[in-house]
Image (cartoon, helix red, strand yellow):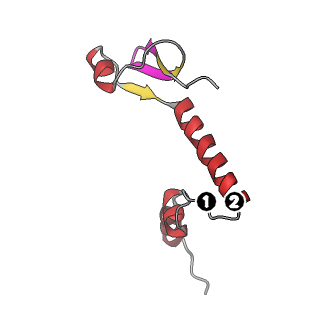
Amino acid sequence: MAPYVETPILKQTRRARQAIIEGGRTPLLSHAQLEAIGYKIAVYPLTLLNVSIGAMRTALRELLGHRRASAAMDFDALKTAVGFPEYYAEEARYRVEKT
C-alpha cells in the first residue's frame, strides 16, 4: 500500500480563504505557512477517516484475540466524549414532575 500523503487544495471564497487538506502529490504546508499566505481554515477529513479505520482494525484484531481493545476509553470518558453530560443537563432542565 502506498504511503498516505496530505495535500492542500487551496480555495478562496468571498468570506474566507480555505485550505482543504486531502491526499495527493502537492507537499503538505504547515499551519504557519498556510496562515502566512492568507488561509484561515485547514480541514483533514481523510486523515481523520484514515486514523479511525486504523484504530477500528486494531481494536477488531485485539477483540479477535480475546483481549480488550487497548485504545478503548472507560465508560465515563465515552459518555463525556459523546455528550451524555449535556444531554442529561437538558433532560433535567425540561423534566416535568408528575403530580
- Please give the label number shown on residue 88: none
Mark 2, secondary structure of its residue: helix
Dot 1, how many residues are within 10 Å of its Cα: few (below 14), some (14-19), or many (20+)? Answer: some
Question: Is residue 14 part of the magenta span, yes or no?
Answer: yes
Question: Is residue 87 part of the magenta span, yes or no?
Answer: no
Q: Out of 87 and 56, give the one closest to the viewer.
A: 56
Give the quadrant of residue 28. top left
Amino acid carrying label 2: it is: Leu
**Range of residues picked out in magenta:** 9-21
| Residue in the image at 64% along x and 26% along y | 1
- Please give the label number shown on residue 63: 2
**Pointer 2 with pointer 1, Cβ within 8 A:** yes
Q: Out of 8 and 65, give the one closest to the viewer.
A: 65
Marks 2 and 1, Cα distance to the nearest angstrom? 6 Å
Q: Give coordinates of residue 57: x percent, y percent.
A: 66, 46
Q: Give coordinates of residue 56: x percent, y percent.
A: 64, 48
- Please give the label number shown on residue 69: 1
Q: Earlier in the sequence, mark 2 or mark 1?
A: 2
Dot 2, how many residues are within 10 Å of its Cα: few (below 14), some (14-19), or many (20+)? Answer: few
The single residue placed furthest to the right in the displayed view is 64
| Residue in the image at 40% along x and 14% along y | 14
The correct choice, above or below, for 85 with respect to 24 in the image is below
Amino acid carrying label 1: it is: Ala
Mark 1, secondary structure of its residue: loop
